[in-house]
Amino acid sequence: MAQMEKNSALVAKVAEGYAAQTAIRALVQTIPYVGGPIDTLFAGKGQKIQQARVERFLTELDERVRALPTVHGSIPEDQLLDLMIGVLDKVVRTRSEEKWGRFAQIVTHQIEQGGAVDDAETATRIVSELEDIHIQVLFEAICAPLLFQLFDGQRIVTISEKPIATPSGATSLQLQKAFPLVPLMTLRLVCSELVAKGLLRDEGVGRWDLRGMEYFAPTDLAGWLFRWIAKSSRK
C-alpha cells in the first residue's frame, strides 16, 4: 500500500508540472505574427481544455489504482516519471474519453505488476495511434466465434457482404452488421490500417479463391495489447 501511495504521489506531481508549461508559452510568444494569438489560446480556453483532460484522466486513474487488490512490485521512479510524461502528453491530444480510459488502464496495469515500463510505453504508443473504431474492430475480431471448419479454426471477421459459410451454415463475423452506421469504405480502411500495424492478419489470400483484404484474424500482438487495456477496451 505504501508503494501505491508513493506511485500516486509521483503521478500527481508530474501532472502538476506538466500543466504549467510556462517555458512553452514563452517560446510561443516569440513566433512572429501568430505567437500572441496562439499564446492567448494556450493561456485561456486551450489551457483550460487541456487541464480538464488531465484532471479527468487522473480521476479515472485514481479510481482504477485504488481498486487494485495489491501491487506486486515497485517501479523505478525515473521510469514511472517517463511513462507518466509520455501518457499525459497523449492525454491532452485526444478528446476521446475511451482513449483516456485505455491510457489509465495501461498505467494501472504497470503499477500493479511493477518492474520496467518498456511494454507499457509500447502499449501507450500503439493506443495513441489508434482511434476508437480501430479498438472496436479489434475487440470484435478477438471475441469472434471460432470457425472450426474454415480458416483452421481461427476467429475471423470480414467485410465481405456474402462471406463463405461452413457446411453447417456458420460464417465469419460481418463487420458491416456489427457497425451498421460505419461506411464500408471506412471499415475497409480501418482493417487495412490494423493489418499494417500487425494487429490483424489478412486471411483471404490463397484460400478458396477468396479476395485479399476481406477476411481478417487477430494477431498475437492484438491479444497482447488487449491484455494491457482489457478493462477499457469497450464501453
Image (cartoon, helix red, strand yellow):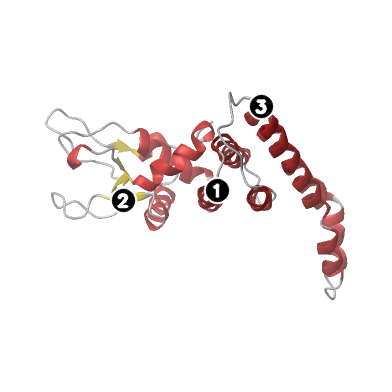
Residue 201 is labelled as 2
The residue carrying mark 1 is 116
Residue lying at 42% horizontally and 37% vertically, measured from the top left:
139
Q: 179 or 207, which lies in front? A: 207
Q: Are marks 3 and 2 in contact (CB under 8 Å)?
A: no
Question: Mark 1 to mark 3: distance in Å?
Answer: 21 Å
| Mark before the other along the chain sequence, 3 or 2 | 3
Q: CA distance from mark 3 to mark 2?
A: 37 Å
41 or 200: nearer the eye? 200
Mark 1 or mark 3, earlier in chain: 3
Q: Amino acid at mark 2?
A: Arg
Horizontal side of residue 65 vs 17, given as left or right:
left
Name the amino acid type tagged 1.
Ala
Residue positioned 59% across, 42% down in the render: 103
Give, as a three-letter code, the residue at label 3: Arg
What residue did someone put label 3 on?
66
Asked whether the residues under the numbered discs 1 and 3 touch, taking CB atoms below 8 Å apart as contact, a structural biologist would say: no
Which of discs 2 and 1 lies nearer the camera? The answer is 1
Answer yes or no: is residue 181 visible: no
Q: Position of residue 144 (x, y in %)?
A: 32, 33
Callout 3: SS: helix
Q: Nearer the viewer, residue 82 or 88?
A: 82
Vertical arrangement, residue 97 with respect to residue 28, above or below? above
The x and y percentages for residue 166 are 15, 34
Q: Quadrant of the N terminus?
A: top right
> Looking at the picture, how far across and down is residue 165, in whole percent?
18, 36
- Please tell me whether mark 3 or mark 2 is closer to you in this view: 3
